Image (cartoon, grey):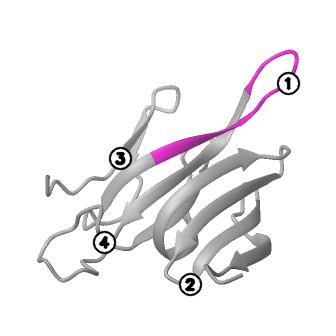
Amino acid sequence: NNALVNFRIVDIEGQTNRWLFAQTDRLIIETRDLILASADTDQKLGQIMVVIEQDTDGNGHLSERDDKTLYLTDARWSAPVQIAKSVRALLAVSTQSATQADVIFETTKGTHAARISLPEGITLSEQAFSPND
Protein backbone atom coordinates (compact mmCIF):
# COMPACT_ATOMS: atom_id res chain seq x y z
CA ASN A 1 0.00 0.00 0.00
CA ASN A 2 1.55 3.29 -1.09
CA ALA A 3 -1.16 5.57 0.36
CA LEU A 4 0.22 8.79 1.83
CA VAL A 5 -1.54 9.81 5.01
CA ASN A 6 -2.27 12.93 7.01
CA PHE A 7 -4.77 13.43 9.83
CA ARG A 8 -7.51 16.05 9.69
CA ILE A 9 -8.02 17.41 13.20
CA VAL A 10 -11.64 18.47 13.78
CA ASP A 11 -12.61 20.64 16.75
CA ILE A 12 -16.39 20.39 16.98
CA GLU A 13 -16.68 22.83 19.88
CA GLY A 14 -14.56 25.47 18.13
CA GLN A 15 -16.05 24.68 14.70
CA THR A 16 -12.58 24.44 13.15
CA ASN A 17 -10.54 21.83 11.31
CA ARG A 18 -6.94 21.60 10.12
CA TRP A 19 -4.37 19.13 8.84
CA LEU A 20 -1.95 17.74 11.43
CA PHE A 21 1.02 18.01 9.06
CA ALA A 22 1.48 20.86 6.58
CA GLN A 23 2.14 18.50 3.64
CA THR A 24 0.90 15.02 2.88
CA ASP A 25 4.26 13.61 1.72
CA ARG A 26 4.51 11.07 4.53
CA LEU A 27 3.08 7.77 5.68
CA ILE A 28 1.78 7.51 9.25
CA ILE A 29 2.03 3.82 10.12
CA GLU A 30 1.34 3.72 13.86
CA THR A 31 -0.06 5.83 16.69
CA ARG A 32 0.34 4.92 20.36
CA ASP A 33 -1.62 6.70 23.08
CA LEU A 34 0.13 8.08 26.15
CA ILE A 35 -2.23 7.24 29.03
CA LEU A 36 -1.68 8.18 32.68
CA ALA A 37 -3.58 5.59 34.69
CA SER A 38 -4.91 6.41 38.14
CA ALA A 39 -7.40 4.88 40.58
CA ASP A 40 -10.09 7.37 39.51
CA THR A 41 -9.72 7.65 35.75
CA ASP A 42 -7.28 7.29 32.90
CA GLN A 43 -6.02 10.56 31.43
CA LYS A 44 -4.87 10.75 27.81
CA LEU A 45 -1.76 12.96 27.66
CA GLY A 46 -1.01 12.63 23.96
CA GLN A 47 0.30 10.18 21.41
CA ILE A 48 3.52 8.98 19.81
CA MET A 49 3.32 8.62 16.03
CA VAL A 50 5.58 6.51 13.81
CA VAL A 51 5.96 8.34 10.49
CA ILE A 52 7.81 7.49 7.29
CA GLU A 53 8.97 10.65 5.53
CA GLN A 54 11.62 9.48 3.06
CA ASP A 55 12.28 6.57 0.73
CA THR A 56 15.42 5.39 2.56
CA ASP A 57 15.57 1.92 0.97
CA GLY A 58 15.52 3.34 -2.58
CA ASN A 59 12.58 1.31 -3.91
CA GLY A 60 10.66 4.36 -5.16
CA HIS A 61 7.89 4.51 -2.56
CA LEU A 62 7.30 4.90 1.16
CA SER A 63 6.87 1.62 3.05
CA GLU A 64 7.50 0.09 6.45
CA ARG A 65 11.00 -0.91 5.24
CA ASP A 66 12.04 2.76 5.24
CA ASP A 67 13.51 4.58 8.24
CA LYS A 68 10.92 6.11 10.54
CA THR A 69 10.59 9.36 12.48
CA LEU A 70 8.91 9.50 15.87
CA TYR A 71 6.62 12.43 16.67
CA LEU A 72 4.84 13.48 19.85
CA THR A 73 1.51 15.32 19.90
CA ASP A 74 -0.47 16.35 22.95
CA ALA A 75 -3.99 15.14 23.74
CA ARG A 76 -5.52 17.90 21.58
CA TRP A 77 -3.39 16.90 18.58
CA SER A 78 -1.36 20.13 18.58
CA ALA A 79 1.54 20.54 16.15
CA PRO A 80 3.69 17.37 16.13
CA VAL A 81 7.16 17.56 17.71
CA GLN A 82 9.90 15.31 16.32
CA ILE A 83 11.49 13.22 19.08
CA ALA A 84 13.67 10.76 17.11
CA LYS A 85 14.68 10.07 13.50
CA SER A 86 16.37 7.26 11.55
CA VAL A 87 14.34 4.80 13.63
CA ARG A 88 14.04 1.17 12.50
CA ALA A 89 11.33 0.21 15.05
CA LEU A 90 9.37 1.63 17.98
CA LEU A 91 9.63 -1.01 20.69
CA ALA A 92 7.81 0.43 23.72
CA VAL A 93 6.11 3.53 25.10
CA SER A 94 5.44 4.00 28.81
CA THR A 95 3.89 7.02 30.53
CA GLN A 96 5.79 7.78 33.76
CA SER A 97 3.92 10.86 34.99
CA ALA A 98 1.81 13.75 33.70
CA THR A 99 5.03 15.37 32.44
CA GLN A 100 7.26 12.46 31.36
CA ALA A 101 7.18 9.36 29.16
CA ASP A 102 9.73 6.72 28.24
CA VAL A 103 10.20 5.70 24.61
CA ILE A 104 12.30 2.69 23.57
CA PHE A 105 13.26 2.43 19.92
CA GLU A 106 15.80 0.80 17.63
CA THR A 107 18.14 2.44 15.14
CA THR A 108 21.01 1.01 13.10
CA LYS A 109 23.27 2.04 16.03
CA GLY A 110 21.36 -0.03 18.58
CA THR A 111 18.51 0.24 21.06
CA HIS A 112 17.72 3.60 22.65
CA ALA A 113 15.81 4.29 25.87
CA ALA A 114 14.78 7.95 26.06
CA ARG A 115 12.80 9.87 28.67
CA ILE A 116 10.92 12.76 27.09
CA SER A 117 9.04 15.70 28.55
CA LEU A 118 5.33 16.07 27.94
CA PRO A 119 3.97 17.87 25.98
CA GLU A 120 7.17 19.58 24.71
CA GLY A 121 8.90 16.42 23.48
CA ILE A 122 12.31 17.44 24.82
CA THR A 123 14.67 14.52 25.46
CA LEU A 124 15.50 14.64 29.17
CA SER A 125 17.82 11.62 29.10
CA GLU A 126 18.80 8.91 26.64
CA GLN A 127 20.74 5.68 26.83
CA ALA A 128 21.91 3.74 23.78
CA PHE A 129 22.87 0.06 23.82
CA SER A 130 24.73 -1.39 20.87
CA PRO A 131 24.30 -5.08 19.97
CA ASN A 132 27.83 -5.69 21.30
CA ASP A 133 27.22 -4.26 24.81
Residue stretch rendered in magenta on the structure: 31-42
Q: Nearer the viewer, mark 2 or mark 4?
A: 2
Determine the image quadrant of residue 103.
Answer: bottom right
Residue 111: x percent and y percent? 62, 71
Residue 39: x percent and y percent? 88, 17
Q: Amino acid at mark 1?
A: Ser
Q: Which of the numbered marks, if any, corresponds to residue 38?
A: 1
Front-most of 13 and 94? 94
Secondary structure of the residue carrying numbered label 1: loop
Q: How far, Cα to Cα, is label 3 from label 2? A: 31 Å
Determine the image quadrant of residue 110.
Answer: bottom right
Q: Nearer the viewer, mark 4 or mark 3?
A: 4
Instruction: State the residue at coordinates (72%, 46%).
Output: 94
Q: Residues within 10 Å of mark 3 (few under 14, many from 20)?
A: few
Disc with the residue nearer the chain's start (1 vs 2): 1
Q: Nearer the viewer, mark 1 or mark 3?
A: 1
Determine the image quadrant of residue 88.
Answer: bottom left
Magenta stretch: residue 24 in it? no
Disc with the residue nearer the chain's start (2 vs 4): 4
Residue 66 relative to residue 1: left or right: right
Can you see residue 63? yes
- 103 vs 110: above or below: above
Q: Which residue is mark 3?
A: 7
Q: Which residue is mark 2?
A: 109
Q: Which residue is mark 4?
A: 66
Q: Residues within 10 Å of mark 4 (few under 14, many from 20)?
A: many
Q: Amino acid at mark 4?
A: Asp
Secondary structure of the residue carrying numbered label 2: loop
Front-most of 82 and 17? 82
Can you see residue 82? no
Disc with the residue nearer the chain's start (4 vs 1): 1
- 88 vs 34: above or below: below
